[in-house]
Amino acid sequence: MAPRPRAVDANQQTVADMKAARSRTSVSVQTVRNYLYGGQKVWDLRERLEKILVREPLFDKQHRDFLGRTDQFIRAAAITNRLDELRRIHSWSEEEYTTASSLLSEGTSIALHDMAFQPVFLGQGSPALMENYWDLVYEKGIQGCYLQTELGHGTNVARLETTSTYIPETQEFEINSPSLTSTKWWIGALGKSATHGIVQAKLILPNGKDMGPHLFFVQLRSLEDHKPLQGITVGDIGPKASGGMAAQDQGFARFDHVRIPRTNMFSKFAEVTTEGSYIQPPHAKLSYGGMMYIRATMIPSAGWAIAKAATVAIRYTTVRRQGEPDAKGLERQVLTYPSTYYRLLPILSRAFVFIELGRYTMKALTQMQQQLANRDTSLLPEMHALLCGLKVFVTTHGINDIETARRSMGGHGFSAFAGLGRLYIDYLPSATFEGDNFVLDGQVVRAATKLCRAVLSSTSAIDKLSLPSAYLRLLSATSEAPPQVTATTWHDVHSVVLLLEWRAALMVKNFTQTPANGDVDANVNQRLAKAVTEAFVAAQVGEMINNLAVLPSEDARVVGCLYRLYLLTSAENALADLLSVGLIRHTGVGDPTQDLRLAVKALCLEVLPNAIGLTDAFGFSDWSLDSALGVFDGRVYEALWQRVQMEPMNKDEVTPAYAPYIRPMLQRGQAAAQQKMKLKSRL
Amino acid sequence: MAPRPRAVDANQQTVADMKAARSRTSVSVQTVRNYLYGGQKVWDLRERLEKILVREPLFDKQHRDFLGRTDQFIRAAAITNRLDELRRIHSWSEEEYTTASSLLSEGTSIALHDMAFQPVFLGQGSPALMENYWDLVYEKGIQGCYLQTELGHGTNVARLETTSTYIPETQEFEINSPSLTSTKWWIGALGKSATHGIVQAKLILPNGKDMGPHLFFVQLRSLEDHKPLQGITVGDIGPKASGGMAAQDQGFARFDHVRIPRTNMFSKFAEVTTEGSYIQPPHAKLSYGGMMYIRATMIPSAGWAIAKAATVAIRYTTVRRQGEPDAKGLERQVLTYPSTYYRLLPILSRAFVFIELGRYTMKALTQMQQQLANRDTSLLPEMHALLCGLKVFVTTHGINDIETARRSMGGHGFSAFAGLGRLYIDYLPSATFEGDNFVLDGQVVRAATKLCRAVLSSTSAIDKLSLPSAYLRLLSATSEAPPQVTATTWHDVHSVVLLLEWRAALMVKNFTQTPANGDVDANVNQRLAKAVTEAFVAAQVGEMINNLAVLPSEDARVVGCLYRLYLLTSAENALADLLSVGLIRHTGVGDPTQDLRLAVKALCLEVLPNAIGLTDAFGFSDWSLDSALGVFDGRVYEALWQRVQMEPMNKDEVTPAYAPYIRPMLQRGQAAAQQKMKLKSRL
């Protein structure tokens, strides 16, 4: 028999473990926090607003998990209404309102008004539309939505079926849904909330010519009684997978020859005259800015979503003990198992990288938009391809990382009270919306091969490469050679970045040089887009490491470890490619990848003592995380116990299913058993 | 302007596309179906039973997605009761009942009685328990559950805190929960249903000695009124992540010095005498059989879950058209894009492999159990390790494959009506239950290294290797050399299997030979367990290909393609390993992995024309799939439209959220906008 383990109150131990972990922290949580938020001011604003939000009983999150979908929708409407009241009570600026709204982190339908409807209205509304509606839009006197996708078409916008036919006689457009599949579908806030919509429809001129998709402003519901207007059939498209986005009313709409005035066309970039002639937009691509902006915001969003998952999982696995006893007879903290920290610390590193990368990308985008304002579109194609690649990259990681964090928590991770199931399912559609990830990969590859061809055929093209394509410089005859990989390579940031850039350059070159009659594999777009995007991000992380000098040395050291961990994990995930293109080679004995794998482990162990401090630096309150396993003080078992007491099924001592269903089954069974007993006793 | 596309009714086109796909089928759907089911008889039984089930209004699935959790639980209880009635009405045999229950594919709490409680009762119940309770158990006169995990402990069963102290004076055990964390937790059917439970508790003898965990039979609720018995606090642990297993009542229980008779100990393998002495079990490992059996059943279960996902996604992407127009002006069928078929056809291949692999494994297990019955445990350690590895392997793929299939369907895949969200979330916990996948990996590696050491130190050990470890034969000096990889390698089944076996052998050998002071990487257990399991499965798939001769030649050819696709995909996923250990090497130019990737694509294209036929062979009815996107006739848009009309939120023309929440916000906004207008007009 093993010696009897020392009696330990596992519940009390959680507090001690969390305290001990905090006492091991060598970074300044406040300094790292300000670094993540981009300054003390941003943090202060966030903290001031959260204090207001937390006081609101309506904003309590602990009972969400018990509500059915309709009640979740009604709750979200109540929250929306209260948030709007608060904005007026406190005279919030636009920035304050946006911050408060994102702090709430509740799925509400008004988000579609704020993030899709309002910016498009502002960006493309004609002077007449702005004059008549902008104040109503801004003040939420109307609630808007953006109607693009249809039942039959998502990705291929050019094939949308809804028509908008100009009628010169009355100077109106007639919006029509000619078929079942032309039904607008998946439109956020359309189901039960929106009063107005921006409808994407094929513009048909009086001469019958189809000018392709354009935007039109259409009132959907009455401002008197909220009933749908005549000719409009509208409703909710039903529940989403695994209860995702349950509080939102994604909707459908069909238009039966609905008339709107000519001035309701969004005509900043294209116009139809009173007579029905089409005036060409000056530069169609000028309208791309909005979509690119949304994709750019998805980078830090991914970072913050991952940050939440990392915080919950690292806190829980710090206080959860299981398995091998340590010197004190305590079981081992789950986070200290290699298979656990190997999963969680790279996630933590991506949270940091994506938050910072969001800032870098937004800066580049602002620069491009200033050029666009001067009608200079030279940066646009590369920026577009970059943002496609980054969108795929951060959402793919975001989804995986949240789920990996959830799964690292074992059984309790599958409780709704762990909070990561909700985070996951609400984040999941990001792989599909704003461009399906598999489709966007193709755009990245198209841009990369075009540039690669230019570089291969003319050295002058190399000088013109902008940041997103800098890796292609390596294809020049005079470029830096790939590093010879040895054990020390993995300790040198420049070498690791260079390897990841070389990998992209060689893969794109190999692909570009495929003979015209040559076959390419079925997954090539996905592999190439990943390599190209990872080369860019690696170079940016190299920059981030250079820029850490602004931090005090210990903070810089630890955050630097995280960034290096990101780079090494990136290289480790790219091993098949690095070996395939010959950047790492088998030398006849052993395993040439072992040095890298050991370097990953060593960095993990360097980060480990600060894991709790670094997650504290994200600054999430218990209210905001809403997770029994991610509570700040570590009392996870008490938190789980308290949550369970709220479960509505526990209100009845005996379930209402007993009398009608359980009892009859048991009674039949008892009778049958008795019958058998009788038979046996007769034998 | 591009030429205006031919007007096509996308909705009508779906039917034509599905018909065309079926007409391209070259296999006999019936023959392949019988192959998958293991004979016409099994299929006939299934079909006969489904006809009975489909007629039951209670078993309608179309309204499930609209129910809150409590209503889902009550519905499941009603279904359970009705299924029990049907079993009596039709005098179903055990096999018929089990088949009907699995056909229903509803999460019910009675499943825990059938699959966890009843087998343990039967396998370990003492003669006294059997005599008094077996008829009640079998007839469901009582409803059972199996109480193992606690709030504080899952994986580490040895540290469970619940105690069962023997009291010789009254010849009773006293079951007690000494702490918060000793609360039994996550116990299926305990929350609101079960009347009795098998409780795992530390057996404490009168001399104070702790004998570790044993099993005890405890009544939990009254058979009179279903109220919890005195001293027992019991309830539901609340909702699971993303609405998973919503209809089930996983529960918690605390015992306050609850007394049970001595005869309620499950004493088939260990006993306490009336005086309180412990009688050693003859062979503790004999009780392992049950757990191994459950893990073995998870192999075909994974196959059938993947089969459902593959059926839905392949049907939908066959009728969904998007993007590039073909010769007829029709957009391209989504399944024909390389990035789509490359994702979906390997999934289809795994469904076939896992279903067949389940049969192979069950045969091996039955053989071992016959030996166990004769107290011969020689096969046990390897079989245990194999089943650990297979459990990890099939559940990891199952989860990924269902989600990959869902995501391949783009936007509509995120609708609850697509059906794969539900399949996913209910399948997801399989990564954690019956042994957390990351913990089980360690057991696979431990067994593999032990055997590897034996093989390396003695040639006689090689002759004793059983099937799960056959790959280690390659470490013998006289073994078959690894194949020289060329383009033709990938067309030769034996070579691919051999490569995957060599990869496992070399990786395990490298690991085993790590010097005692050497470091190993943090992910090593995961990589090794995967390599070992994949080697075994590859060899089995080689066998499956050999055994295809029983099928008519065209069926054998097509199913053979699927099996070869499985092998190549397995090799492709293992590329980083194959390159790391030097089985594939970079030769200085090009990419040595390209041949494999092109071979994967070529096989996909060979399978593609039969994709619909092969999914039809799974034999799922529309009722069973319950997916608007997976309907047999291809009318996906009509099916989505019909489902949406059932959404409860669409019953009200104006949402109940309007009057209290939406209207006030709009009215405040309208007033504010008016105010602004006034100010402007004054300027």
Image: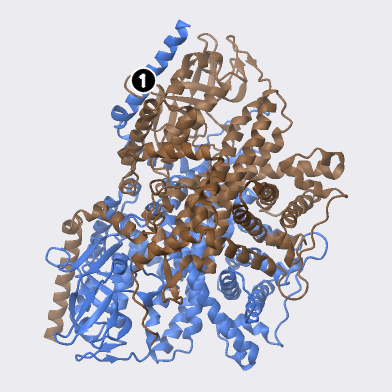
Chain colours: A blue, B brown
Q: Describe the element under mark 1 as helix, strand or loop.
A: loop
State left or right for residue A454 relative to residue A480: left
| Quarter of the rendering occupied by the N terminus of chain A | top right
Q: Which residue is mark 1?
A: B223
State left or right for residue A262 relative to residue A286: left
Which is more toward the observer, A219 or B134? B134
Query: Does A324 appear above or below B396?
Result: above
The quadrant holding residue A59 is bottom left
Is residue B400 visible in the rendered structure shown here? yes
Three-letter amino acid code of the residue under disc 1: Leu
**x and y, in percent, of residue A346 in the image:** 58, 60
Which is more toward the observer, A260 or A366? A260
**x and y, in percent, of residue B241 in the image:** 43, 48
| Identity of the residue drawn at 35% across and 92% down | A282
Which is more toward the observer, B552 or B405? B552
| Identity of the residue drawn at 35% across and 72% down | B8
